[in-house]
């Protein structure tokens, strides 16, 4: 009966546990020995694995604390209760307290996560082709711009994750969101600062096949006009292109700085405020919004890219004089518009996020249990024990404890708060960073799993960053349609993968070993879908670049002839009377009666008498075109020939499950990593993890995949001076597909091998059936006394306690 009275007292105090001590937590009889609880899986508290719902614990006897410890716990809980109010600084009105709940918290963090994914993984990849064309960057240049996101993350990850985890986490998160919004605004400024794109694109054609070519006037000839344009173009664009390049790098660097606290402090803030029972589910929802954000970004970009970049200040008729539509190679969409909208939304969400409390009122019962456990085990209160700054000592310094009677975590935490000058408190934190880093780096299980994640991210980041451009080139898809497909296929499937795996881990209460096996299975499935890169449309041959000029009857000489040279063959006997400018890439298509198609570099190189005009849809009397063209002899239509390939559907059918499996791996792997480190080291360990992932994976990925595009290029765009201007006109689709396939399979095989080795070597360590917390010989009874408290009981579970 005495036992039952203790249990009832414990149940009765669950509602007001935020402000008062619970009798079941702080007092107990000494008439019997503490009873070891019967879990199906028992783990140390720092690993955060809830037990299975099989048999409830016998909450009988607990370790009695001295009166001094009771007083210190109450003082600690008083401080935590004060910090659980919403507001900015000392302004904490009552009408704002509705934010201090789990639902508003997860909504605001998901908004932050969505904005990060929208900008970094949605808008930036969708704007790559447009920015290349607008500012004459190569794909490798765009890869370097994408790298600066990871540079910003790596440089600030350690200080943000270390100091931010020990102070107000909502305030640090709000600063990160402000940096993200500012970076998005700066990313759009090159469009605002540069001259009108339509004004810089002259509608005058320097190439012509008219009879006037026989008159070689030094001032008005095409050669003289081209040379004049070359000189003025070089003077105007050389300095401005470099300036815009560095401006893009600065903006994306701010994106990386703004994202730094999101996946370190943000994940830790969720985990310590929702309890271990809901942690996997909430983290899965959080990561799913990191994928749904890019979906919004790609869909928004698909709409904005349909409008010309100068639509805001130029009438449509003036734009049509230069660019007629998306099929025109000179077309640049309004890539900048979505960045301004995203920046506005980000600034609006900064204040609500900063108003969140340091500790949610609902989580005070969890923190009371953690304080009690640490007091029972005679340990210091660690800086992240309750999401609040306490002692200036880290978990790496448990060995330098004071006198035994003062060794409690509470004894050293309360007096130290707010004492000493500011510079001294910073020094107390900074001096222990090397020790904390050493503890993380010597955790071999953590480091090996992180290495596997880094290699996998090398493939995932590179492929996802350039997938929009990959669809444009491999299947001749318009930029707006390519972004629409990415937003409707890849991103939703990736988000579903994160949510489904989070639900599976939470529902089945998978232990670390089973979660690792689950991740291995997902990677193996993604490996099976990787041969989708073998599905592509062969690139349409460009006459004079990778195909000989056809004869008058449509027959084409053998391309494998050793005498064929690509660059020299743009000029042929059929267009020798023409004076053409190679900087003018104005493709036209000739379709024969038998269905064959030929794409010509420009109407001039096709031998057409009419000069190029944006409003002209067809050109007639083209001397290099066969006679048996449809509707009319020797006629060509404006634009590249539409591909007759229908492989895009099959590619997307394999691309959808590949996206699901690839991104679904994140949740179980992150859950395993969180359980390989101590509870108080989670934020800092996640920071170290993301540094390794970026240094090994995401930093080299954009340049590596940008290099794949560059080496697959068959013909580069040239300027009026005859030099390469950076843009690629045609890629070898087969070579590009083989490169993507090779790197994807190689990365997945290495990742799979590392995880299998981890499972074979550390399988027993990852098994939740064993307790891995090694205690001194005299502490076994203390460990038994605190096992029950290590399970953070939910209110509905407390009512079911039995004898």
Image (cartoon, rainbow, N blue to C red):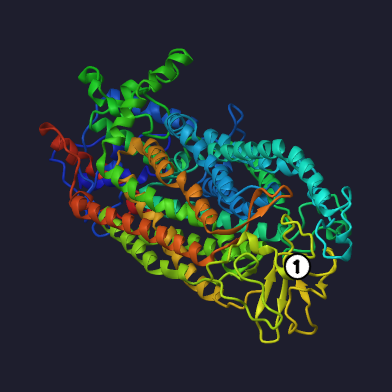
Q: Nearer the viewer, residue 92 or 654?
A: 654
Q: Nearer the viewer, residue 192 or 570?
A: 570
Residue drawn at x 36%, y 45% is 12
From this viewpoint, which residue is outermost toward the bottom?
Answer: 594
Q: With respect to residue 442, does 791 lie above or below?
A: below
Q: Position of residue 785 (x, y in %)?
A: 19, 39
- Look at mark 1 in the image and give the residue it sits on: 575
Assess disc 1: are there few (<14), some (14-19) or many (≥20) residues with their C-alpha within 10 Å of its C-alpha.
some
Q: Nearer the viewer, residue 323 or 637?
A: 637
From this viewpoint, which residue is outermost toward the left?
Answer: 777
Q: Position of residue 694 (x, y in %)?
A: 44, 43
Locate residue 587 relative to residue 455 in the image: left or right: right
Locate residue 299 relative to residue 799 in the image: left or right: right
Q: Position of residue 796 (x, y in %)?
A: 37, 54
Q: With respect to residue 390, does 387 lie above or below?
A: below
Residue drawn at x 59%, y 53% is 125
Q: Quadrant of residue 271?
A: top left
Q: Secondary structure at mark 1?
A: helix
Q: Is residue 706 visible?
A: yes
Q: Position of residue 422 (x, y in %)?
A: 48, 16
Q: Nearer the viewer, residue 1 or 553?
A: 553
Locate residue 399 relative to residue 419 in the image: left or right: left
Residue drawn at x 36%, y 58% is 746
């Amino acid at each position: 009966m005495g036992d039952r009275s203790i249990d009832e007292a414990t149940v009765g105090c669950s509602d007001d546990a935020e402000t008062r001590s619970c009798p079941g937590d702080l007092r107990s009889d000494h008439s019997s020995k503490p009873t070891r609880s019967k879990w199906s899986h028992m783990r140390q508290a720092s690993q955060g694995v809830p037990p299975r719902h099989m048999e409830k614990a016998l909450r009988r006897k607990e370790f009695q604390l001295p009166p001094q410890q009771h007083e210190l716990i109450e003082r600690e809980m008083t401080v935590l209760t004060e910090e659980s109010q919403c507001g900015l600084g000392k302004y904490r009105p009552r009408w704002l307290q509705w934010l201090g709940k789990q639902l508003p918290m997860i909504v605001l963090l998901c908004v932050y996560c969505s904005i990060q994914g929208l900008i970094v993984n949605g808008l930036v990849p969708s704007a790559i082709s447009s920015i290349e064309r607008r500012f004459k960057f190569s794909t490798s240049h765009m890869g370097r711009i994408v790298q600066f996101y990871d540079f910003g993350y790596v440089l600030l990850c350690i200080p943000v994750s270390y100091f931010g985890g020990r102070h107000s986490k909502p305030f640090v998160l709000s600063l990160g969101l402000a940096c993200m919004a500012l970076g998005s605004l700066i990313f759009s400024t090159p469009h605002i600062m540069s001259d009108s794109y339509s004004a810089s694109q002259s509608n005058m054609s320097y190439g012509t096949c008219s009879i006037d070519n026989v008159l070689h006037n030094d001032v008005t000839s095409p050669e003289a006009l081209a040379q004049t344009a070359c000189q003025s173009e070089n003077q105007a664009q050389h300095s401005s292109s470099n300036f815009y390049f560095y401006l893009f790098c600065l903006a994306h660097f701010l994106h990386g700085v703004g994202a730094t606290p999101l996946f370190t402090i943000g994940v830790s803030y969720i985990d310590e405020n929702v309890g271990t029972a809901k942690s996997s589910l909430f983290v899965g929802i959080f990561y799913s919004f990191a994928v749904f954000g890019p979906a919004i970004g790609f869909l928004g970009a698909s709409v904005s890219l349909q409008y010309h970049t100068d639509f805001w200040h130029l009438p449509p008729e003036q734009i049509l004089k230069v660019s007629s539509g998306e099929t025109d190679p000179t077309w640049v969409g309004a890539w900048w518009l979505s960045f301004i909208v995203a920046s506005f939304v980000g600034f609006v969400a900064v204040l609500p996020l900063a108003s969140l409390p340091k500790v949610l009122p609902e989580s005070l019962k969890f923190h009371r249990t953690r304080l009690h456990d640490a007091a029972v085990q005679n340990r210091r209160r660690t800086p992240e024990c309750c999401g609040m700054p306490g002692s200036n000592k880290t978990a790496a310094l448990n060995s330098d404890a004071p006198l035994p009677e003062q060794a409690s975590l509470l004894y050293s935490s309360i007096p130290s708060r707010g004492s000493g000058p500011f510079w001294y408190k910073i020094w107390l934190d900074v001096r222990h960073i090397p020790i904390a880093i050493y503890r993380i780096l010597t955790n071999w299980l953590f480091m090996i799993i992180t290495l596997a994640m880094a290699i996998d991210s090398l493939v995932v980041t590179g492929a996802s960053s350039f997938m929009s451009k990959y669809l444009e080139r491999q299947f001749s898809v318009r930029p707006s349609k390519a972004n629409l497909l990415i937003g409707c296929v890849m991103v939703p499937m990736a988000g579903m993968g994160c949510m489904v795996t989070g639900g599976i881990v939470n529902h089945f209460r998978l232990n670390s070993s089973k979660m690792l096996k689950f991740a291995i299975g997902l990677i193996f499935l993604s490996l099976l879908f990787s041969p989708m890169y073998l599905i592509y449309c062969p690139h349409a041959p460009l006459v004079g670049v990778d195909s000989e000029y056809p004869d008058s009857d449509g027959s084409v000489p053998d391309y494998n002839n050793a005498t064929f040279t690509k660059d020299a063959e743009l000029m042929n006997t059929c267009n020798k009377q023409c004076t053409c400018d190679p900087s003018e890439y104005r493709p036209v298509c000739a379709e024969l009666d038998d269905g064959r198609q030929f794409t010509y570099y420009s109407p001039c190189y096709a031998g057409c008498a009419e000069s190029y005009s944006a409003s002209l849809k067809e050109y007639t009397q083209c001397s290099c075109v066969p006679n048996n063209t449809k509707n009319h002899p020797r006629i060509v239509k404006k634009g590249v020939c539409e591909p007759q390939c229908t492989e895009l559907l099959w590619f997307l059918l394999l691309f959808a499950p590949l996206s699901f499996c690839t991104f679904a791996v994140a949740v179980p792997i992150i859950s395993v990593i969180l359980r390989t480190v101590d509870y108080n080291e989670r934020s800092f360990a996640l920071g170290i993890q993301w540094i390794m992932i970026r240094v090994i994976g995401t930093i080299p990925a954009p340049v590596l995949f940008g290099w794949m595009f560059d080496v697959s290029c068959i013909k580069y765009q040239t300027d009026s001076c005859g030099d390469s201007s950076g843009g690629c006109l045609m890629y070898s689709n087969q070579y590009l597909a083989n490169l993507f396939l090779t790197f994807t399979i190689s990365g997945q095989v290495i990742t799979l091998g590392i995880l299998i080795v981890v499972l074979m070597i550390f399988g027993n360590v990852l098994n939740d059936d064993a307790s891995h917390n090694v205690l001194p010989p005299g502490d076994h009874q203390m460990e038994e006394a605190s096992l029950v408290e290590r399970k953070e009981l939910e209110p509905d579970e407390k009512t079911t306690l039995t004898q």
